[in-house]
């Protein structure tokens, strides 16, 4: 472990980790790259797609699925396309993206986010 202190700019750098996910067990010959997203993205997507956990998850994947250079393969308008992937492939990508971004159980996170929003509603 290094004791090198990072600068603010280094800590906030937009370039996150890339991870290759092999999808050969889902009926395709190959895989895709996933990248880390910003910590606030799940809250943003949960707000945008309230009560639609599949769309929240698909929207997260549109932000994570990328090429080896980290460039997104799907845009914000491709949520329905990603949500329509075969369930096994979609599930494998969700599993990898949530682990990589340390989101845990997306449904539980969404429920907690909704409960927190309801609790904080009078504080605005």
Image: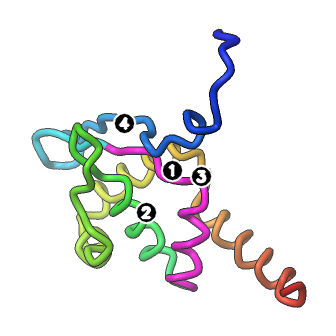
Q: Please, what secondary structure does the residue beneath circle 1 have?
A: helix
**Quick check: marks 3 and 2 in contact, CB under 8 Å?**
yes
- For this view, does 27 lie left or right of residue 12? left
- For this view, does 112 lie left or right of residue 46? right
Disc 1 packing (10 Å; few <14; some 14–19; many ≥20)? some
Q: Position of residue 81 (x, y in %)?
A: 23, 74
The residue under label 3 is 103
| Precedes in sequence: disc 1 or disc 4 | 4
The alpha-carbon separation of the residues under discs 4 and 3 comes to 16 Å
Task: Please identify, in this view, whether the residue under mark 4 or under mark 3 is nearer the observer.
Answer: 4
The alpha-carbon separation of the residues under discs 1 and 4 comes to 13 Å
Q: Is residue 108 above or below residue 119?
A: above
The residue under label 4 is 18
Disc 2 packing (10 Å; few <14; some 14–19; many ≥20)? many
Question: Which quarter of the figure has residue 61?
Answer: bottom left
| Precedes in sequence: disc 2 or disc 4 | 4
Disc 3 packing (10 Å; few <14; some 14–19; many ≥20)? some
- For this view, does 114 lie left or right of residue 43? right
The alpha-carbon separation of the residues under discs 3 and 1 comes to 5 Å
**Quick check: marks 2 and 1 in contact, CB under 8 Å?**
yes
The residue under label 2 is 60
Q: Which quadrant, please, contains the N terminus? A: top right
The residue under label 1 is 98
| Precedes in sequence: disc 4 or disc 3 | 4
Q: Please, what secondary structure does the residue beneath circle 4 have?
A: strand
Task: Please identify, in this view, whether the residue under mark 1 or under mark 4 is nearer the observer.
Answer: 4
Disc 4 packing (10 Å; few <14; some 14–19; many ≥20)? some
| Residue at (31% x, 63% y) in the render | 87
């Amino acid at each position: 472990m290094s004791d090198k202190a990072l600068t603010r700019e280094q800590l906030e750098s937009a370039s996150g980790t890339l991870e290759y996910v092999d999808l050969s067990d889902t009926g395709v010959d190959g895989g895709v790259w996933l990248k880390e997203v910003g910590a606030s993205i799940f809250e943003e997507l949960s707000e945008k797609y309230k009560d639609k956990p599949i769309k929240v998850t698909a929207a997260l994947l549109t932000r994570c699925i990328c090429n080896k250079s980290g460039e997104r393969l799907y845009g914000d308008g491709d949520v329905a396309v990603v949500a329509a992937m075969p369930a096994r492939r979609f599930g494998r990508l969700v599993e990898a993206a949530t682990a990589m971004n340390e989101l845990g159980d997306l449904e539980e996170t969404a429920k907690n986010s909704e409960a927190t929003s309801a609790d904080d509603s009078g504080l605005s």
